[in-house]
Image (tube, grey):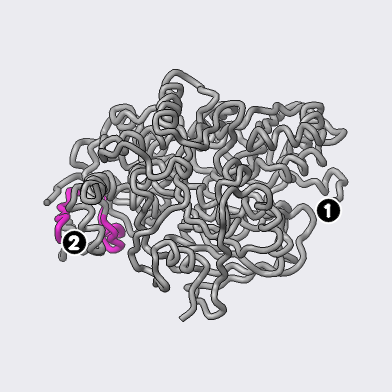
């Protein structure tokens, strides 16, 4: 699957309180989460983000809380993919589990600028920027995680597993 | 090659003799936990799996603590989902307003977690139970849903870093200061994906409550878990509490660590983490003087009896500064009652503190102590991110209960030494 989208840039250590502040966690309704996504990092984000946009951030993206509402908020806001040099581990698991594409790509994260339109091939991990002579490559997912994603996420995978045992 | 403490526990729960860092394993869990923010999403996902029971009703615990007592109608609906689920699936260990507590204070106190366990919780501070020698880590709601159904979870076996503490603790230095200092040195992703293994002679003499505080904040260095060796202090704590068998694991002498750090306590003074990262630490001598509006003592990090005791020791016979709001949150009903019987609560209230029922409320800007634009809080909690306790233009400084209590009296960040106090053991 290939995604082409406009880039929003953020810095290092974007925490889950920035992605979706806890004051909105009295509901997990996707529309509610989308309406406040990233607002403490950039108050204009919820109104300006468009479906298919791509976040390119610094290291340790998604640090802090275990709230799955963070990747859910990004997905509900229409963010198609997040590219960063590294992700906080719980956010990483949550993103895979709910089907928000994330790519670990230090070179791409450093080189790509705000507002660029880039193309990401999720199958190959190739990231193409109009301002870079060569495409960037993201770190490939371990085979087990690829299997999880191919199964349609952890819940579909678990459903198969428990039914096999039943 | 030898194994680290976390490797040993994970291997035993995966039915293996050996696991290596980076290996993907399927592990049995001894306990699965969620709260009133994360359980509603987990329940939705659980319902999609198509099972009619949880893997073990003794080993799934849902604690309403974040927005409870219900702060508004939406929160009430979320907490009700959790209560309905607990009833429907016959969960054995149920806690609610009047019997509950902040989950990470509550579970060890109630003897639901112990040495050698693998525990997962849909809350990032689940790493707290590493203080008991358990492998314990935070996950999201979907991971938790799958574990509620199967009793299993997949892990990538973490590499480990070793943190050794030696020397003599300086006055008013607690576990909170040691962990803030450590995070200040290695950064908020200094232990990303890793296990933080704590040890050393200074740890051997550290109280259980201080160990919980340290393990609690392993996540603030990006770690998967923080873990302590089991010793007499651990065994004393679990005695009469722990409701099931436990296993003591020890790291092999030739275990391999990706990094080893040594800290001399002679050089560590009480710490304050400045906005907006827990790693942005300074010694109290550099931090003293900043004016504040609110002081919070409590949370899963510092809401235990030792924490309330030190605050009362400092506030005894003193008054909270007229420009300061001091809010104290005992971690559990039992801690509240113990503090009441010891006279701590009376001391705190006489000094001008507001004492609340246990809740995570103010720590995450949920309720019970939200900051206005431009306000500054000094707090014994674990995070000082932008907007963490309220308005995005408010500020949070993190510290120990001793520094928090002294600052509440001074009306600005300062230390008990400035009040002429000496620490008593």
Observer-nearest residue: A88 or B151?
B151
Image mark 2: chain: A
Name the residue located 46 percent from the left edge and 36 percent from the top edge: B91
Q: What residue does disc 1 label?
A: B425
Note whether B130 is above or below B382 in the view shown: below
Q: Position of residue B125 (x, y in %)?
A: 51, 47
Name the residue located 71 percent from the left edge and 44 percent from the top edge: B307
Q: Residue furthest front?
A: A166
Magenta stretch, residue numbers: A103-125
Q: Position of residue B35 (x, y in %)?
A: 47, 36
**Visible residue check, residue A26:** no
Left or right relative to B363: residue B41 = left
Specify few, some or many for label 1: CA neighbours under 10 Å numbering under 14, 14-19, or 20 or more.
few
Specify few, some or many for label 2: CA neighbours under 10 Å numbering under 14, 14-19, or 20 or more.
few
Name the residue located 84 percent from the left edge and 33 percent from the top edge: B318
Note whether B240 is above or below B264 in the view shown: above
Q: What residue does disc 2 label?
A: A132
């Amino acid at each position: 699957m290939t995604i082409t989208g406009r880039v929003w840039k953020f810095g290092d250590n974007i925490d889950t309180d920035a992605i979706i502040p806890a004051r909105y966690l009295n509901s997990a309704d996707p529309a509610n989460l989308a309406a406040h996504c990233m607002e403490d990092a950039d108050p204009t984000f919820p109104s300006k983000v468009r479906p298919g946009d791509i976040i390119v951030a610094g290291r340790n993206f998604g640090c802090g809380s275990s709230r799955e509402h963070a990747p859910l908020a990004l997905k509900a806001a229409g963010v198609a993919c997040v590219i960063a040099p590294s992700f906080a581990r719980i956010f990483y698991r949550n993103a895979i589990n709910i089907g928000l594409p994330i790519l670990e790509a230090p070179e791409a994260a450093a080189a790509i600028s705000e507002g660029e339109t880039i193309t990401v091939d999720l199958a190959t991990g190739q990231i193409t920027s109009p301002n870079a002579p060569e495409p960037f490559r993201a770190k490939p997912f371990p085979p087990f995680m690829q299997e999880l994603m191919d199964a349609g996420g952890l819940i579909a995978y678990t459903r198969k597993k428990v039914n096999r045992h039943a | 090659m030898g194994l680290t403490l976390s490797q040993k526990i994970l291997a035993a729960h995966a039915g293996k003799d050996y696991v290596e860092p980076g290996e993907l394993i399927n592990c049995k869990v001894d306990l699965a936990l969620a709260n009133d923010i994360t359980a509603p999403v987990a329940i939705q996902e659980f319902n999609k799996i198509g099972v009619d029971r949880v893997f073990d009703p003794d080993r799934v615990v849902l604690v309403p603590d974040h927005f409870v007592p219900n702060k508004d109608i939406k929160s009430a609906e979320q907490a009700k989902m959790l209560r309905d689920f607990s009833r429907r699936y016959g969960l054995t260990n149920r806690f609610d307003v009047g019997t509950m507590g902040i989950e990470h204070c509550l579970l060890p106190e109630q003897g639901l977690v112990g040495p050698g366990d693998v525990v997962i919780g849909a809350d990032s501070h689940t790493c707290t139970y590493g203080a008991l020698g358990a492998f314990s880590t935070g996950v999201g709601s979907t991971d938790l849903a799958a574990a509620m159904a199967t009793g299993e979870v997949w892990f990538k076996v973490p590499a480990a870093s070793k943190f050794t503490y030696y020397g003599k603790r300086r006055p008013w230095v607690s576990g909170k200061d040691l962990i803030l200092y450590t995070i200040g040195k290695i950064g908020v992703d200094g232990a990303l994906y890793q296990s933080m293994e704590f040890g050393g002679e200074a740890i051997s003499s550290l109280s259980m409550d201080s160990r919980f505080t340290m393990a609690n904040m392993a996540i603030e260095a990006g770690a998967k878990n923080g873990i302590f060796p089991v010793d007499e202090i651990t065994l004393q704590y679990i005695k009469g509490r722990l409701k099931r068998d436990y296993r003591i694991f020890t790291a092999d002498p030739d275990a391999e660590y990706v990094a080893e750090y040594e800290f001399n306590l002679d050089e560590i003074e009480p710490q304050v983490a400045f906005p907006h990262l827990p790693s942005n630490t300074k010694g109290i001598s550099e931090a003293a003087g900043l004016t504040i509006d609110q002081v919070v003592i409590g949370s899963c990090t510092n809401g235990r009896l030792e924490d309330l005791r030190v605050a009362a020791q400092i506030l005894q016979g003193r008054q909270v500064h007229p420009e300061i709001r001091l809010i104290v949150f005992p971690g559990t009903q039992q801690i509240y009652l113990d503090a009441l019987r010891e006279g701590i609560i009376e001391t705190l209230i006489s000094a001008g503190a507001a004492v609340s029922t246990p809740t995570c409320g103010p720590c995450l800007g949920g309720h019970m102590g939200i900051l206005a634009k431009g306000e500054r809080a000094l707090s014994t909690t674990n995070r000082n991110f932008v907007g963490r306790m309220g308005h995005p233009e408010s500020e949070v400084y993190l510290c120990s209960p001793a520094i928090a209590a002294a600052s509440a009296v001074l009306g600005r960040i300062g230390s008990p030494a400035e009040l002429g106090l000496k620490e008593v053991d």
